Image (spheres, grey):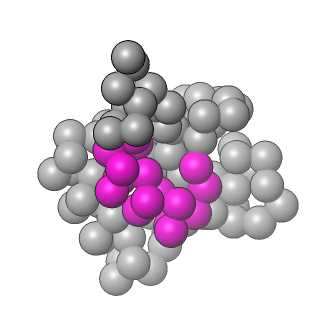
Amino acid sequence: MPLNELAVPERVIGEKEVLKALERGTLRKLFVAMDSDPARLTPILRRAEAAGVEIERTDSRVVLGRACAIDRSAMAAGLVCSACGPEGTGS
């Protein structure tokens, strides 16, 4: 799995930031750790699927956190498009 995609500045890390990006319509790819609490992970997956966002799964929160270059585990992370959504119309 290409977690090296997360080595860019246009990313969000963590459940709340991923949900905010989904609400704004700027999330273009979601990365989730499958060892996360299903009660917290399932709503994020459902919203991403409904929005047509590509989803990449990894086995471990620790691995996902390392891919994001943070010293803690991460349940979710995502790539965002700053030119997408209502605030970035490209005009």
Residue drawn where x is 69% and y is 56% of the image: 65
Q: Is residue 58 something that shows in the picture?
A: no
* Farthest front residue in view: 91
Q: Position of residue 37 (x, y in %)?
A: 44, 79
Q: Quadrant of residue 9?
A: top right
Q: Position of residue 15 (x, y in %)?
A: 50, 67
Q: Position of residue 67 (x, y in %)?
A: 69, 44
Position above or below: 81 against 35 = above
Residue drawn where x is 28% and y is 52% of the image: 48
Position above or below: 30 against 74 = above
Q: Is residue 2 magenta?
A: no
Q: Position of residue 53 (x, y in %)?
A: 29, 40
Residue drawn where x is 75% and y is 50% of the image: 66
Residue drawn where x is 43% and y is 51% of the image: 21
Does residue 34 appear to the left or right of 65 in the view shown?
Answer: left
Start and end of the magenta stretch? 12-28
Q: Is residue 3 something that shows in the picture?
A: yes
* Farthest right residue in view: 71
* Farthest top residue in view: 91
Position above or below: 41 against 91 = below
Does residue 21 appear to the left or right of 77 in the view shown?
Answer: left
